[in-house]
Amino acid sequence: DAGITQSPRHKVTETGTPVTLRCHQTENHRYMYWYRQDPGHGLRLIHYSYGVKDTDKGEVSDGYSVSRSKTEDFLLTLESATSSQTSVYFCAISEGNGWPHGYTFGSGTRLTVV
Amino acid sequence: DQQVKQNSPSLSVQEGRISILNCDYTNSMFDYFLWYKKYPAEGPTFLISISSIKDKNEDGRFTVFLNKSAKHLSLHIVPSQPGDSAVYFCAASGSGNTGKLIFGQGTTLQVKP
């Protein structure tokens, strides 16, 4: 397997609570990404990291923060969960710019905010 | 503004026939394009890619065609098999170190036995 795991796989949380999703890789890849998948929108980039403590925003970053204190871990935090953040979240890794094999994705975390 | 668009949410074909999935883009600066396949409850998996300097790339039953003047790419699957039933995403990326793949909305392919 690709050496990327996401936890938890499923989570139900209440509106207004903080939530942290974890992505762990064993490939020692430099780049890590968080995407969310929603019907009609495909996969949209939330945040990405290009090294330890180096992160930047994607197209749908509002309401999310990330941290990368080690090469292998990339955490996504919803500071105060809202129903609009109910989604499937995918972490991905890449060694370089993604050419020619793109990213390797984790299996996803299904988050439900009630 | 959606830079990568897949305008067909779904496609149904008969086993053994050709499946053609389409993708349009707006940014002429994209360097390369990829197709991913996704089964339910799994992450997307890489299928095939093409550089912007090529117009065709083939890998077994899968061929991707790129028409830069029309800003259009397509994925052909021949022959289609029931196991090909999945959601297919096209993605594009510009130059730069971070890659930052931009994905289309996805097309659900159903291959009927």
Image (cartoon, rainbow, N blue to C red):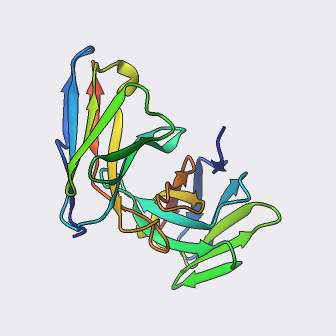
Q: Is A59 drawn above or below residue B6 in the view shown?
A: above
| Label tally | 0
Measured as percent of width and height from the top left, residue A106 is found at 28, 55
Residue A69, visible in the rendered structure: yes
Residue B17, visible in the rendered structure: no
Measured as percent of width and height from the top left, residue B110 is found at 50, 58
Q: Which residue is drawn at 73% across and 62% down?
A: B72
Residue B95 versus residue B47: which sits nearer the camera? B95
Q: Is A60 drawn above or below residue A43 in the view shown?
A: above
Residue B62 versus residue A98: which sits nearer the camera? A98
Task: State left or right for residue A3 relative to residue B13.
Answer: left
Q: Which residue is drawn at 62% across and 74% down?
A: B51
Identify the residue at the far top of this view: A16
Q: Is A72 drawn above or below residue B60 in the view shown?
A: above
Task: State left or right for residue A42 relative to residue A34.
Answer: right
Which quarter of the figure has residue A14?
A: top left
Measured as percent of width and height from the top left, residue B101 is found at 51, 56
Q: Residue at x 53, y 65 (%)?
A: B35
Measured as percent of width and height from the top left, residue B78 is found at 58, 78
Identify the residue at the far front of this view: A53
Q: Residue at x 65, y 61 (%)?
A: B30
Which quarter of the figure has residue B65?
A: bottom right
